[in-house]
Image (cartoon, rainbow, N blue to C red):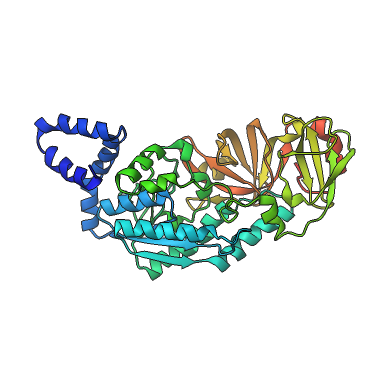
Amino acid sequence: MNWIHLEKRWKRLTNTKRNFSTYELKLKRIGPSLISIRMKIRISSAWTEKFIDSNMFKSVACAVSGGIDSAVTAYLLKARGFDVIGVFMKNWDLNDEFGYCCSDKDLLDADKVCQHLKIPFHEVQFINEYWDEVFTNMLNGYVAGKTPNPDILCNRLIKFDQFFSYCMQKLKVDAVATGHYARSSFGQFLENFSPEKNAKLLRPTDKLKDQTYFLCQIPQASLRRTMFPLANWLKKDVRVMAERTGMGWLNAKKESYGICMIGKRNFKNFISEYVVSKKGCFVDVDSQKKLGEHEGIHLFTRGQRVKIPGGKCPYYVSKIDPVDSTIYVCCYNCHPSLYTSSVQTLQPYWIEGQEPQILKKSKNLRCDFKYQHVLRSTSCIVKKLPSQLGLQVELKHPVRAISAGQYAIFYNDQDECLGGAEIAGTNPSWPELCGNLLMKTEETQHFF
């Protein structure tokens, strides 16, 4: 029994109270998640008709990537009566070592989804802009011994800036939608939109797929007109929906992780094509003895395990000195020099357009801190640095392997992502155990 047939049966049978339990049993036989999925669609039907009739948000450009999340997002939009346009964004056009560009396959998949859903399909390219504003910044970060996050920059500078502007101005749509697992205070489909208020970015129902970390610097103007249809969906339900709507072939496609333009390639081989190697030494953080040589600091990040021939123990990167390309390493992954008690940031970006009132008044903000997408958050106190634009973030518990170039993301107790800032430097949890190294590098800025 296909999905369209189920839609018709649902409307007909649910009008008869006597037949509801029978139909519910039919749905249960088809799939355990299908009843909850169908109810999610029914709940919003009332406001959908009202909203579309009012012409506030009638046409929507949906970012389609060729993946399952954006495909189901496009389906949900169409199911609610929006005039949907699928738009594929291409930011990279270089082939891998096998002569194959992964974005070509994604383009074909995105086109196939739009054909299946019978919605218009567009392709737009921001290859030069991505290179200048995101990729070059990433390379400069690795050369400086940092751990950059190009996904956050891409969302801020490309997807929710230039792509958003293209959709609104060129395609003349009323709103943009993406398959991110995130929530807006304006609702999944902007049903709570208010021209007098700013939108808030909130964590989604599926906390394991939470992508608010990558959206921490989304422009407020874009957030106000962006829909997140998967806000209240679990990933497992999205997969069921894809199967039931004739797009089950997307379930066999692997999810993309890591830096998008690298794809399946080896990171070392990829980055070495763009960064000139500058050899340096491995130095033991405790004894200050030279342990070996490496091919360049751009190949390492803090907390990474390194193989040193003849090493007496498992070594991990403790600190990277970009001045002389020295990489300080420590024994074992629980060494004190790997842990951080506080961080300093560059100028923060606050999603609501201004810093939280409590920070403005008291100069202190108690909230949750996160520096990696996959890790849990930890409590912190955020303070404004005197006579500086950055922040001082004091962590409740020591955190392992925070690196300059990563982003400090802040959440309040209402699941709201307040914003974020690039980490400029960190302070060790046990300075007395790292005294020698601190003295040796006193003239340099924030190596820990």
| Position of residue 123 in the picture relative to residue 321 (left or right) | left
Q: In which quarter of the image is residue 138?
A: bottom right
Q: Is residue 306 visible?
A: yes
Q: In which quarter of the image is residue 275?
A: bottom right
Residue 216, given in percent of the width and then of the height, sits at 52, 48
Query: Looking at this view, is 387 or 7 the one in front?
Result: 7
Query: In the orientation shown, which residue stands out farthest toward the bottom?
Result: 170
Q: Can residue 181 be seen in this view?
A: no
Residue 306, given in percent of the width and then of the height, sits at 76, 39
Residue at position x 24%, y 41% from top?
A: 43
Query: In the orientation shown, which residue stands out farthest toward the front?
Result: 98
Residue at position x 45%, y 60% from top?
A: 107
- Could you tell me how many numbered marks the image carries? 0
Residue 364, given in percent of the width and then of the height, sits at 59, 39
Residue 134, given in percent of the width and then of the height, sits at 60, 59
Query: Looking at this view, is 8 or 82 the one in front?
Result: 8
| Position of residue 27 in the picture relative to residue 327 (left or right) | left
Residue at position x 26%, y 40% from top?
A: 38
* Quarter of the figure that contains the C terminus: top right
Residue at position x 49%, y 44% from top?
A: 211
* Quarter of the figure that contains the N terminus: top left
Does 22 appear above or below 62?
A: above
Does 279 appear above or below 332?
A: below
| Position of residue 371 in the picture relative to residue 272 (left or right) | left
